[in-house]
Image (tube, rainbow, N blue to C red):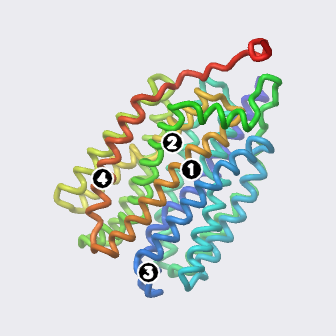
Amino acid sequence: MDALRRHSLLIIVVGSLVISLAMGLRHGFGLFLEPMSSDLGWGRGVFAFALALQNLIWGFAQPFSGALADRFGAARVVVIGGLLYALGLAFMGLSESALGMSLSAGLLIGLGLSGTTFSVILGAVGRAVAPEKRSMAMGIVSAAGSFGQFAMLPGTLGLLGWLGWSTALLAMGVMAAMMVPLGAMLKDRPSARLASDLSLRAALDEAAGQRGFWLLCLGFFVCGFQVVFIGVHLPGYLFDNGLAVQVGSTVLALVGLFNIFGTYAAGWLGGIYSKPRLLSWLYLTRGAVITAFVFLPLSPTSAYLFGITMGLLWLSTVPLTNGIVASVFGVRHLSMLGGIVFLFHQLGSFMGVWMGGYLYDLTGHYDVVWKIAILLSVVAALLHWFISEAPVKRPQPTEAQA
C-alpha cells in the first residue's frame, strides 16, 4: 500500500511540474501579439491565426495522444511532446513570415501541447489514484497548471523586455526542454487489460451513444472560446483602451494566481456535489463577470478585479469535466475520451482567438466577440444542467454471451 501511495504521489508531483511548464509558457503568448505584429508589419490577424491553428492542432491531436498514453503510458508521450514544444518555441523566435509563424507557433507547439497537458497527465493521475480521491487529485494537478501561469508570466514579461521577443522565445524553448527529463520520470502504469474491458472501438461507440457525452463536448467548446480569446486578446484590448502594457500582464498573472484556488476548490467540490450542476453555475457566473467587465467603466482596478474573478473560474472546468468522463466511462480509456472532449474545447479556442483577431481587423474593436462570449455562457449552463454523471451500465460478460 505504501508503494502504491508513493507511486500516486510521484505521478501527481511530476505531472504537476509538466503541466506548470506547459501551461505557464503558453499563458504568456498574448504578450507577444503587439511586439511581433508591429515589428514584422503584420495585422493582428496573422498572429491570431497562428495561435488559432495551434489550438486546433492541439485539439485534433489530443485524442491520438491520449490513446497512445492509455496504451503505452504517459512518459513516452510527454517526452515527445516536450521536444516538439521546445522546437516550436525556438522556430517561433526565428519566424519572420506568416508561414513560419503558423508552422512553429501553430503546428509544432500545438502538437507539443497535446502531449504535455491535461488529457495525458490527468489520465495518468486518474489511473494512479483511488476513485474517491480522483476529483481532488485532478484538482491539485490542474491547480499546478494555474500556478505555472501565475509564476511564469512575470518571467516571460521580463524576458520580453530584457531580450526582445525573438531571444525571449528562444529562452522559453530552453525552459520547455525541461519537460523531456520530467516526462521520462512519469512512470505511468496503463490499466491492466481485463477480459471485461471494452476495446478502443467499443469505448468510442459507447461514448458516441451517450447524449451526456456530446453535451459535455459542446459545453467545453464554450470554455475554450472564452479563455483563449481572453488570454490572447485581453492585453491588446486593455492597451487599446489606454491602459499600460503592465496592466495587461498583471491581469493575466492574477488570472493564473487565483486560478490555483479556483481549480483546487472545483476539484474538492466535485467530490461532494454534482459536477454537472457545478459547471452550470460556473458558466453562469463567468457570463455575469464578463458582462460587468465589458459594460462598466474600464480602469486598472476593474481590470484587476476581472483578472481575480475570472481566475477563480478559469480552469476550474477541467477537473470537473474530466471527472465526469471518469465517473461515467471509467479510467481504461480516460485519456482518449478526455481528449475527444478536449478537441471540442480547442475548436472553441480556435474560434475565439481567430474571431477575435479577424473581427478586430475588420471593425477595430472586440465588442462583438465579448457579446458572443456572454451568450455562450448561458448556452453552456443549460447544456451541463442535463448531464448525468452516473456510471454507464454495461452488460456483464455472462449477460453479453447470453
Q: Residue 286's spot in the image, x, y percent?
A: 33, 45
Judged left or right of residue 11, residue 192 is right
Q: Residue 304's spot in the image, x, y percent?
A: 30, 56
Task: Compute the Cα span from label 1 to label 2.
Answer: 8 Å
Q: Residue 337's spot in the image, x, y percent?
A: 63, 40
Q: Circle 4: is it few (<14), some (14-19), or many (20+) Cα within 10 Å?
A: many
Q: Which residue is mark 1?
A: 343
Judged left or right of residue 223, residue 63 is right
Q: Residue 271's spot in the image, x, y percent?
A: 51, 25
Query: Which badge, 3 or 2, comes first in the chain's sequence?
Result: 3
Query: Which badge, 3 or 1, comes first in the chain's sequence?
Result: 3
- The image quarter containing residue 100 is bottom right
Q: Residue at x 72, y 53 (%)?
A: 78
Residue type at numbered disc 3: Ser
Task: Compute the Cα span from label 3 to label 2.
Answer: 33 Å
Q: Secondary structure at mark 2?
A: helix
Residue type at numbered disc 4: Phe
Mark 1, mark 4: which one is toward the viewer? 1
Query: Which badge, 3 or 4, comes first in the chain's sequence?
Result: 3
Q: Which residue is mark 2?
A: 217
Quadrant where the C terminus sits is top right
Residue type at numbered disc 1: Leu
Q: Which residue is mark 3?
A: 37
Task: Compute the Cα span from label 4 to label 2.
Answer: 26 Å
Indicate whether 134 appears above or below 28.
above
Q: Are marks 1 and 2 in contact (CB under 8 Å)?
A: yes
